[in-house]
Amino acid sequence: MAIPTRKRDQRLEVRTTAEERELINRAVDVAGTDLTTFALHNLLDASRRVLADRSEFLLSSDQVAEWDRINEAPARELPGLVGLMRRTSPFTS
């Protein structure tokens, strides 16, 4: 069974200083991979971390307990909200 491959047809260019490039090259060598694979792997990891706080939240056990305490508390009655919900919607005929 052949493993499907994805065609990479988008180019990404990055400008670096000589010192930055040397550091990157050393890391690539230590990782035992090529520059494209190294860069792509690390860019994707960094991108996922940046976006993670918009889709998932990592909490300690104390934070989970606090979250549960807040969410298990009874809802407060807000008189203004009750009045608003009793009004006829302007979007119905």
Image (cartoon, rainbow, N blue to C red):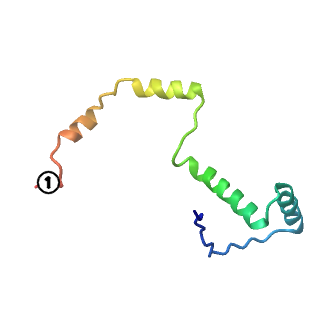
- The quadrant of the rendering that contains the N terminus is bottom right
Q: Tell which of 74 and 4 is nearer to you.
A: 4
Q: Could you say whether the residue bearing mark 1 is in a helix, strand or loop?
A: loop
Q: Residue shown at 82%/55% (left/top)?
A: 31
Q: Quadrant of the C terminus?
A: bottom left
Would you identify the image quadrant in which residue 20 lies? bottom right
Q: Nearer the viewer, residue 53 or 89?
A: 53
Viewer-nearest residue: 18 or 28: 28
Q: Quadrant of residue 81?
A: top left
Name the residue rendered at 89%, 64% in the picture. Answer: 22
Q: Position of residue 29 (x, y in %)?
A: 86, 60
Task: Indicate the quadrant where residue 61 lies.
Answer: top right
* Residue type, label 1: Thr
In the picture provided, is 57 more to the left or to the right than 78? Answer: right
Q: Is residue 48 above or below residue 79?
A: below
Above or below 5: residue 86: above
Q: Position of residue 70 (x, y in %)?
A: 45, 26
Q: Who's the residue at 42% across and 28% down the image?
A: 71
Locate residue 53 relative to residue 15 in the image: left or right: left
